[in-house]
Amino acid sequence: MESINLENTLKALNLQYPPILDKKDHTKYVKDWREQYVGETSAVLRPVDTKEVSNIIKFAHDNNITVVPQGGNTSLCGGATPDKTGSSLLISLEKMNNIRSFNVEAQTITVDAGVILSSIHERVEEENLFFPLSLGAQGSCMIGGNLSTNAGGINVLKYGNSRELCLGLEIVLPDGKIMNLLTELKKDNTGYDLKNLFIGAEGTLGVITGITLKLFPLPKMITTLFVESKKIFNALKLLNIFKSEFPGCIESFELMPHNFWVVAKNNIENMVMPLEKIPEMGVLIDISSYSNHDIITNDQGEIPIINKIENVLAECLETDLITDATICKNQAQSKALWSIREAGAESEKKELEKSNLIKCLKHDISLPLEAIEAFHNDAQKMITSFLPNLKTIYFGHLGDGNLHYNIFGNGSLPDGFEGKSLELTDKLYEIVYKYNGSFSAEHGIGQLRKESLKIHKNNVAYSLMKTIKNQIDPKGIMNPGKVL
Amino acid sequence: MESINLENTLKALNLQYPPILDKKDHTKYVKDWREQYVGETSAVLRPVDTKEVSNIIKFAHDNNITVVPQGGNTSLCGGATPDKTGSSLLISLEKMNNIRSFNVEAQTITVDAGVILSSIHERVEEENLFFPLSLGAQGSCMIGGNLSTNAGGINVLKYGNSRELCLGLEIVLPDGKIMNLLTELKKDNTGYDLKNLFIGAEGTLGVITGITLKLFPLPKMITTLFVESKKIFNALKLLNIFKSEFPGCIESFELMPHNFWVVAKNNIENMVMPLEKIPEMGVLIDISSYSNHDIITNDQGEIPIINKIENVLAECLETDLITDATICKNQAQSKALWSIREAGAESEKKELEKSNLIKCLKHDISLPLEAIEAFHNDAQKMITSFLPNLKTIYFGHLGDGNLHYNIFGNGSLPDGFEGKSLELTDKLYEIVYKYNGSFSAEHGIGQLRKESLKIHKNNVAYSLMKTIKNQIDPKGIMNPGKVL
């Protein structure tokens, strides 16, 4: 299709915001956050409501034009970046940022797909409610993208993935039809679960335009603590102790090992270390309570939550389960500690810019909790023997078995690293599968992990995915080159 | 296909248990629990493992024979009953009743589809763990059926539906292929969510043969209380008070209004009433605690949970939110009260046998919590003006907005009731939809609600469901005549 024709036809769609046709204004839309993928688009469209999305998709469908839906463009797998052909229309949801309704009593909120995640946090907290989805990109990622990728984050341990936080969806299908599955109901068994098919489909089956979310009571107090142990195994034992001592109150349980701290220290200005020296195996823990002066009993009687945490930690120190610990005295201390954890990907990015590495192999894996230590040992053996001068920096959501297990060159790029990187990743995934894990825990597939999906996904499931894709999007116009 | 041929061909499958071919041995398999549907089958097959299920389905697929999968046969919608043609094979999962693995540390269990729900409860409680799915039929329903219908029950308020309790599935597809989606992982974003497509599909897309379930810590103590209020609105206010006073601890919140108690009293031998007289609007509440002498603070300081419950109830009595209340003193009292609630459907069945009614209109609806009172008022107006002598008996899971809203004749069958029953149900569902509710909250569609699905389901979603069914089961052999 000639661009002059496209310009005229797009005008006929009569969108409230004009299409962005000039290539030089496309930069922020066609490049992914990690700058691994740079694509092109024929036009960036910014619909203001579901009807406009529907009109665009119908137009694309009738004219066999591919479309790439995009939220905050924070995918770590190139899931929202168009390919280099420049033939796709890019639909940015950024102008669809209304809160449609907020039912405080029922603890639900219905929003446009383009609402930024942190705006939802702020709005619901005004009413003493809490939306638990929380991740590093929350200031720029959009809720539609979060649902399209079934985002995880730091609170999955207690509240589940994005999927579990969603009551209803509104979707524009690949033929432009609007499917309204928005509901506040907790129970609805009227036929197949279509909602969950679109959650995590990364825009390959349709465009999510509206979402009804579950909200929760805002905890009255969060106590943040940081502990050091010697081994992952000890950290996992600690998790079970905390889960039984503070049932339903462990909001997050984040692993921050030695190498993570080294990179953080190199790249975060004025960073304050929580403990005297760089911790061996650090764990960041949030414990919630719902009363101002929360009291929880133990065998010795009734003690306030801080005292109880201190007692539990003292016991763990005595038995050498942990080697050091600190409890944040105020919100500022807690925020400072969390900002280090949340800057994990950002710090790594800066570290890469400083060094002369051109490639860092990022992995977002999950494992059964009891298999993490054995996996790590096997993986380290494999990496050491694969090439010299490779360094692993890992961190992640230990409570859910989710590790960001990243491998990069130590100081300089080892010979052959560039050519052998796929081989290295495959070898790592083989170990992941040996321990019944997954090679994509929360980032999804996008462009980055398509090949891995083909290799490692159960054959029957992969072929059923293809069947479903072909049936729902027979023309293959939705987010081409992603997932399948 | 001639029965003699079938007999020989089935022999060739070499199943561990021989096919039941004699019609007179089919009775318990071809009649639903409520005796609304009586069908026929050419043979009842009882596979012992997934391979046998796969072989049976492959045989049926290759020979264009329809199959009806069946668990405990406790569907309230005829979901597991074959049609009257007698041409379907019935696959009972009753011989697949092994616990495949139990990971106490990770709090997960993997079981065959034919394991009876209460057996799972018993097994995990031995290890101080808890599987929360709980419903009236738990002594005979099977976990595969629970997942196939996304069963709800009394603990959805805190733990979610069956769907939320399932980590992984093993499914035999309509061509006999085995799809192994069994996993213990909390996070796995490798492609489309196929698992949830089969949960709640009522055996129309394949046969669930294995399930990995999430387990929870067993509460150390459950306090059961029963309160009386005058109106649903008051009961809902009470729910919000309890949710904020005992966050994360309200296990269930069940509505048992006046008419429910009248029927219960007529049909349960030696029933002990919890309060002096039959309550107007009764609510049965379970509150969990995880410590032997649980202490929760309120503004006045620290008080044990029983004291706290008493204080909260006293305040509610003072403000006339409730009119009477009692706290069970021991497990026996609690069990007695719960057995009345759980016998809800059974008592109604007995009441029908005693009277000369030939039809009772059962409805399993859900509503946004804040709309329940208005719905009930509208519904009662409609029912009163529809025909004389109609009586509504409703009860249900108020915490999830799920009501079992049953209409039947008061003493004798009103003229025209039989012929007009569908019309009455449709009028009721119109009111349900007016308030953004659902006409099937937890029982599913089966045979009973197929027409309602066609009328009331969103058109786009209904047609997408058909697309998916046709694609996954192109020969239409799976559980014919159900759902679509």
Image (cartoon, coloured by chain):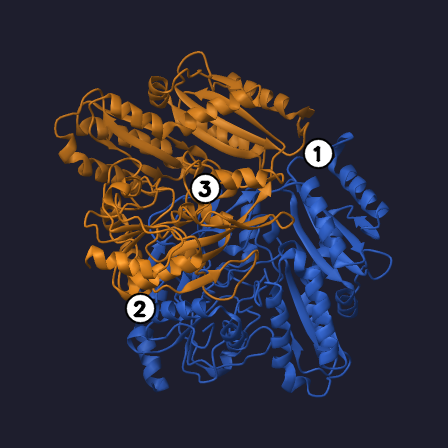
Chain colours: A orange, B blue
Q: Residues within 10 Å of mark 1 (few under 14, many from 20)?
A: many
Is B199 rendered above or below residue B58? above
Q: Nearer the viewer, mark 1 or mark 3?
A: 3
Lateral position of residue B196 relative to residue A132, left or right: left
Residue A143 falls left or right of residue B354: left
Q: How far is disc 2 from disc 3 in space, using C-alphas?
A: 44 Å
* Amino acid bearing label 3: Ile
Residue at left offset 53%, top offset 41%: A131
Q: Nearer the viewer, mark 1 or mark 2?
A: 1
> Mark 2 Cα within 10 Å, few/some/many (few <14, many 20+)?
many
Asked if one can make out residue B92 in the rendered structure from this viewpoint, the answer is: no
Question: From the image, which quarter does the C terminus of chain B lie in?
Answer: bottom left
View extreme (top): residue: A276
The part of the image, by quadrant, that contains residue A414 is top left
Find numbered disc 2 in the image and state the secondary structure of the residue it sits on.
Answer: loop
Give the distance between the C-alpha atoms of the residues marked 1 and 3, in whole angstroms: 37 Å
Depth check, mark 2 against mark 3: the one in front is 3
Q: Which residue lies under the disc numbered 3?
A: A116
Residue A233 x/y as whole percent? 41, 28
Q: Chain of mark 3?
A: A
Bin the neighbour count of mark 3 within 10 Å (Cα to Cα): few under 14, some 14-19, many 20 and up: many
Q: Which residue is mark 2?
A: B175
Distance from Cα at disc 1 to Cα at disc 2: 56 Å
Numbered mark located on residue B296 in the image: 1
Rendered-image quadrant of the N terminus of chain B:
bottom left
Where residue A52 sits: x, y (%)? 40, 58
Task: Name the residue nearer the viewer: A310 or A32.
Answer: A32
The answer for which chain carries disc 1 is B
- Residue type, label 1: Ile
Q: Is residue B274 visible?
A: yes
Whether residues under marks 1 and 2 lie with C-beta atoms below 8 angstroms apart, the answer is no
